[in-house]
Amino acid sequence: MNSDASPARSPLRAISSMATRQLLAELARVNASAGGTPLELESVGGVDAARRVAAGEAFDLVFLASDAIEKLIASGHLLADSRCDLVRSQVAVAVKSGVPAPHIATASDVRQAFLDAASIGYSTGPSGNALLALLDRWGIRAGVQEKLRQAPAGVPVAAMVANGEVVLGFQQRSEMIGAPGVEVIGDLPAEIAIETVFSGAVCRASQRTDEARAVLEEFAAPKHAAIKRHHGMATLWPRPAS
């Protein structure tokens, strides 16, 4: 045994929403292989993750939609100056593999798809709330309410599409690409796009804040843009031309 070898560092404990689980797992692997602090990541439904952090469960890092991060900062559970925006993610539309897909090129197409679909799956959290708000703006929510199926926390909408529980599914693209049995037919068109910024922050109770900040800085580094694109997300800058 080499007595000069550095002792292995214990992993930081982190929690995230399901939308970023695969991305964060890969970033954590890359970081650890380069000598960075390892991460023990648990991914659950975003609502459940925020509840557990607010209840005082011990974590070093939290990765959630930016509005959830802000609420946890405001309640004193996260260090305000540690917030780090990591990626932006679009809501996409999926159907079961082999099933004819509706047109979704325009807002009018998507509205008609809602009216025509026999059943519609959508997620919890900010993207699901934004989708319901869109139906309200169109004035069709009451008319399609009986067809709406909200995925239970931690259950991918893609799974509901694949098993035939719903015909049309709406969720973060990162949660649907590569899912077995589904075809992602595209993001919502620009005029009704639903974009979520996912951020990370250090828990106030963490005893390893410097290491946790270093992990956040590494995850936000521009060199990881290709990994983020691979997982259906994009870096924050530059934004595409409108």
Image (spheres, helix red, strand yellow):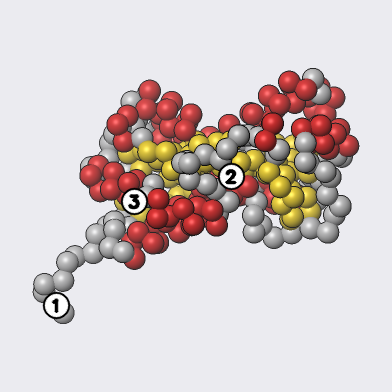
Give the quarter of the image for residue 145: top right
**Residue positioned most to the bottom:** 1
Compared across the picture, whether 122 is left or right of 29 comes to right
**Which residue is identified by label 1?**
2
Residue density around tag 2, few if under 14, some if 14–19, many if 20 or more, within 10 Å:
some
Q: Residue at 79% across / 54% down in the picture?
A: 96
Type of amino acid at the residue the image marks with label 2: Gly
Give the image location of residue 46, x and y in percent. 52, 38
Residue identified by numbered label 2: 154
Using a 10 Å C-alpha cutoff, classify the residue at mark 1 as few (fewer than 14 neighbours), some (14 to 19) or many (20 or more): few
Q: Kindly check if marks 2 and 1 are in contact, taking CB atoms under 8 A apart as contact.
A: no
> Between disc 2 and disc 3, whose residue precedes?
2
Quadrant (top left/top right/bottom left/bottom right) for the C terminus = top right
SS assignment at label 2: loop
Q: Is residue 85 left or right of residue 95?
A: left
- As helix, strand or loop, the secondary structure at mark 3 comes to helix
Residue at mark 3: 218
Real-space Cα separation, disc 2 to disc 3, in angstroms: 27 Å
Q: At x 23% / y 44%, what residue is drawn?
A: 210
In the displayed structure image, the side of residue 66 where residue 74 appears, left or right: left
Q: Distance between the residues labelled 2 and 1?
A: 44 Å
Where in the figure is residue 193, as x and y percent of width and height? Answer: 65, 34
Number of marks: 3
Figure quadrant of residue 40? bottom left
User: What amino acid type is highlighted by mark number 1?
Assistant: Asn
The amino acid type, in three-letter code, at marker 3 is: Glu
Look at discs 2 and 3 and give the one toward the viewer.
3
* Residue 167 seen: yes
Which mark is in front, 2 or 1? 1
Q: Work out whether residue 206 or residue 90 is closer to the camera in this orientation and state it.
A: 90
In the depicted structure, whether residue 15 falls above or below residue 80: below
